[in-house]
Image (cartoon, rainbow, N blue to C red):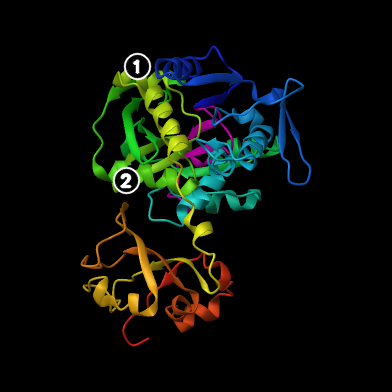
């Protein structure tokens, strides 16, 4: 494998460890300064130049795009993707994670715990917004702050309104977030690589500081995550479209509360704390994806006219709950189950004798007209689906529909 690490800091701990891991595993690697690229566009031939020279071929890239160069950095990553080069994190995934508001908006659609959060522009909306998240104290965050920079704790309403008005007067966009008091200056950092949580630590703030970031002086300690925290980290990473991420979670009374998903997590703190080879795991993941790329079945299975791929959801009161796949009648409708998603687990090519449960999601290939008929009439009226691109979930009707 020939890998390019996109980084402006070749001497940083993380970049050096990733290079060392490549060399140890006999993988070719080069660190490329993200800002030294030129993006050339013409019909059918996307190209990249690096330091005025046409870029040679790479099998994969590992973006370490800093917040200050997000726009240009993600444009470079997107260009690599257009050239067919595998990226550990996609351009869209990086953009989704980099903007705190955008990431929470995406996560809020799914059953993932997040601290109650609000975003306002009019100063008249500030006090009602604070009340909606539970009142003071509140955490105030700049949308694109990193390493704890731009994160403030306001202990009362007067302090909160003063801080928000000052930041808004400086054209800064801020989030107002509930202060999860039971976390008591602690959070969890979980490193996700592919479909695994490979390392985790608890970060603890020191002294009067409420931010637990290592860069803010926080100490770290080993932690054994239970399945709920692991599954939350994995799902948040997948939902935002990332392959490698650091997921920061508060330990709330009702379970994990995702604060942030970082697409370029630092390795020094987690490796020092856990003594695990996180860098090596990242390189192994990328090499595996290069050697055995995932098939995009949505592109390859829509070749026959009238056939396509769709996600089929099974609601709690569906007539299919308790039936095996073979007894469901889907095969008779010319619908084949490719993958079953159940409580965060993926079951490829499930056996026909497997019993369906409420909440299951089936990735199916079959006749589009048959899958169209599975959409309840009331849902069909709300949508204007393009059935030739059945990309939205199909809901199996409940009995009587």
Residue 269: x and y in percent read 39, 20
Q: Residue furthest front?
A: 304
10 Å crowding of disc 1: few (<14), some (14-19), many (20+): few
Q: Earlier in the sequence, mark 1 or mark 2?
A: 2
Quadrant of the rendered structure where residue 75 is?
top right
10 Å crowding of disc 2: few (<14), some (14-19), many (20+): some
Q: Which residue is more in the foreground, 363 or 181?
A: 363
The span shown in magenta is 132-158
Q: Which residue is more in the foreground, 215 or 223?
A: 223
Residue drawn at the location 43% of the way across and 43% of the way down: 237
**Magenta-span inclusion, residue 148:** yes
All told, the count of numbered labels is: 2
Q: Secondary structure at mark 1?
A: helix
Residue 28: x and y in percent read 51, 20
Q: Which residue is more in the foreground, 138 or 274?
A: 274
Q: Which residue is more in the foreground, 39 or 305?
A: 305
**Position of 248 relative to 371 (above/below):** above
**Magenta-span inclusion, residue 205:** no
Q: CA distance from mark 1 to mark 2?
A: 24 Å
Residue, disc 2: 231
Residue 222 as seen in the image, left or right of residue 283: left
Residue, disc 1: 272
**Position of 386 relative to 232 (above/below):** below
Residue 182: x and y in percent read 31, 38
Residue drawn at the location 58% of the way across and 39% of the way down: 143
Is residue 330 visible in the rendered structure shown here? no
Q: Which mark is residue 379?
A: none
Quadrant of the rendered structure where residue 211 is?
top left
């Amino acid at each position: 494998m020939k890998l390019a690490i996109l980084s402006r800091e070749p001497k940083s701990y993380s970049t050096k460890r990733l290079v060392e891991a490549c060399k140890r595993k006999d993988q070719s690697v080069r660190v490329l300064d993200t800002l030294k690229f030129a993006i050339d566009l013409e019909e059918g031939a996307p190209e990249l130049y690096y330091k005025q020279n046409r870029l040679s071929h790479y099998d994969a890239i590992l973006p370490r795009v800093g917040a200050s160069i997000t726009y240009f950095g993600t444009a470079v990553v997107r260009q690599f993707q257009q050239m067919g080069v595998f990226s550990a994190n996609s351009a869209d995934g990086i953009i989704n994670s980099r903007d705190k508001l955008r990431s929470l908006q995406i996560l809020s659609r799914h059953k993932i715990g997040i601290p109650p959060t609000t975003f306002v522009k009019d100063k008249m909306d500030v006090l009602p917004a604070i009340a909606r998240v539970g009142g003071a104290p509140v955490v105030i965050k700049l949308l694109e702050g990193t390493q704890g920079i731009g994160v403030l704790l306001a202990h009362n309403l007067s302090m909160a309104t003063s801080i928000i008005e000052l930041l808004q007067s400086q054209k800064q966009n801020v989030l107002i977030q509930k202060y999860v008091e039971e976390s008591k200056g602690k959070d969890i950092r979980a490193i996700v690589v592919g479909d695994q949580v490979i390392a985790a630590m608890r970060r603890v703030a020191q002294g009067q500081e409420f931010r637990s970031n290592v860069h803010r002086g926080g100490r770290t300690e080993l932690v054994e995550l239970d399945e709920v925290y692991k599954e939350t980290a994995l799902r948040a990473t997948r939902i935002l479209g990332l392959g490698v991420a650091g997921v920061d979670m508060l330990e709330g009374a009702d379970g994990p509360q995702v604060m942030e998903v970082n697409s370029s997590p630092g390795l020094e703190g987690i490796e020092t704390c856990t003594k695990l080879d996180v860098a090596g795991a990242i390189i192994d993941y990328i090499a595996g994806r290069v050697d055995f790329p995932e098939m995009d079945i949505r592109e390859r299975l829509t070749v026959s006219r009238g056939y396509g791929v769709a996600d089929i959801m099974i609601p709690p009161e569906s007539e299919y709950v308790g039936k095996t796949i073979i007894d469901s009648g889907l095969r008779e409708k010319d619908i084949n189950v490719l993958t079953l998603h159940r409580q965060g687990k993926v079951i490829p090519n499930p056996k026909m004798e497997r019993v369906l449960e409420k909440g299951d999601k089936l990735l199916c290939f079959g006749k589009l007209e048959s899958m169209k008929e599975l959409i309840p009439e009331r849902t069909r009226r709300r949508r204007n689906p393009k059935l030739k691109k059945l990309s939205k979930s199909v809901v199996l009707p409940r009995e009587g529909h």
